[in-house]
């Protein structure tokens, strides 16, 4: 990490005539960015993808030091970017010189596919693509789907519990494991599904302020998103009626939420697609989001 910081500073000093603003992402680049900005008289915009101390397993003293450094960066940067309004609470009262919220909206959102005929498709196809960790509610998801033989779970990604999840999938006929997939393949999996699940453990501090791009991708595809209560994104799902909110770890709650979506009529599915498309256009518009980013950097 020290070598990484030195390399960043060296690059910024060497190429100082090629830029006028430094956009630093997280504490990994923030300290080097701040030092170079002060030495060279450049503007520093601090973009917080995830608060460092809340998203990494750091021992007490190191965690507190990381939090102190990050909040100091926020107060000293010319502007700070957050991924969701709810993350303002993580600033612990520190006032940025300028603050902007830029949602985690992909540059090119997928388009809503034509609804396929049911044909021989399962009653419900559930999709999850992301970090393969049990703190993402995957144990409960696998348990619920495995008991519904007319449902199917498409799961992809990689992570610390990949081996366990692969083993569960191999032993369950209605669960298909894709492993690591590219973004295009992930969008195909989502497009073919009826519902997307993203139930993160709210006991993890950073999960309480989550703003996953799954929300915006699901809405753009016209797919309902099931999330856990108390994870930040649940507020957007509730506010814009983009899916369902369940208690984390509750297989019963998850089964009920998925069961209700499974019973949607074709008309209800089409109505949800139109509703989600309107929300994306009016509230999660990429051009408007991009304008906020450009404005804070300019």
Image (spheres, grey):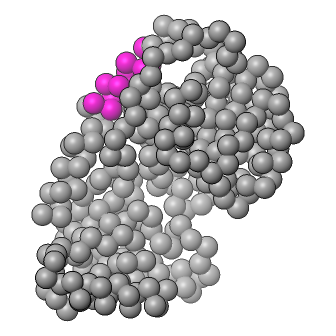
Quarter of the figure with residue 285: top left
Q: Is residue 93 above or below residue 119?
A: below
Comparing 5 with 228, the one in front is 5
Q: Is residue 219 left or right of residue 130?
A: left
Q: Is residue 197 left or right of residue 15?
A: right
Query: Going by the picture, which residue comes out furthest to the right?
Result: 171
Q: Position of residue 135 (x, y in %)?
A: 67, 54
Quarter of the figure with residue 176: top right
Q: Is residue 72 above or below residue 291?
A: below
For the point 35% across and 78% down, which residue is it? 30
Q: Which residues are magenta?
A: 271-281
Quarter of the figure with residue 62: bottom right
For the point 52% across and 29% down, which residue is it? 191
Comparing 79 with 18, the one in front is 18
Q: Position of residue 134 (x, y in %)?
A: 71, 53
For the point 31% across and 88% down, which residue is it? 9
């Amino acid at each position: 990490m020290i070598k990484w910081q030195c390399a960043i500073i060296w690059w910024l000093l060497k190429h100082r005539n090629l830029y006028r603003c430094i956009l630093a992402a997280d504490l990994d680049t923030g300290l080097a960015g701040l030092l170079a900005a002060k030495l060279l008289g450049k503007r520093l915009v601090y973009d917080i993808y995830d608060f460092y101390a809340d998203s990494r397993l750091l021992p007490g003293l190191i965690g507190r030091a990381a939090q102190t450094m990050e909040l100091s960066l926020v107060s000293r940067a010319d502007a700070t970017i957050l991924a969701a309004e709810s993350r303002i609470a993580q600033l612990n009262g520190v006032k940025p010189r300028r603050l902007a919220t830029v949602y985690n909206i992909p540059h090119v959102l997928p388009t809503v596919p034509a609804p396929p005929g049911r044909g021989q498709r399962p009653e419900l196809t559930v999709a999850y693509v992301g970090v393969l960790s049990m703190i993402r509610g995957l144990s409960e998801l696998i348990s619920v789907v495995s008991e519904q033989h007319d449902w199917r779970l498409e799961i992809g990604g990689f992570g610390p519990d990949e081996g366990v999840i692969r083993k569960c999938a191999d032993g369950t006929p209605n669960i298909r494991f894709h492993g690591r997939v590219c973004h295009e393949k992930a969008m195909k999996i989502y497009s073919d599904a009826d519902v997307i699940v993203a139930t993160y453990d709210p006991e993890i501090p950073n999960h309480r302020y989550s703003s996953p791009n799954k929300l915006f991708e699901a809405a753009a595809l016209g797919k309902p998103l099931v999330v856990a209560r108390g994870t930040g994104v649940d507020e957007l799902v509730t506010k814009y009626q983009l899916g369902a909110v369940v208690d984390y770890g509750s297989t019963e709650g998850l089964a009920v939420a998925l069961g209700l979506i499974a019973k949607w009529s074709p008309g209800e599915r089409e109505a949800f697609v139109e509703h989600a498309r309107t929300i994306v256009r009016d509230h999660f518009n990429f051009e408007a989001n991009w304008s906020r980013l450009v404005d804070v950097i300019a």
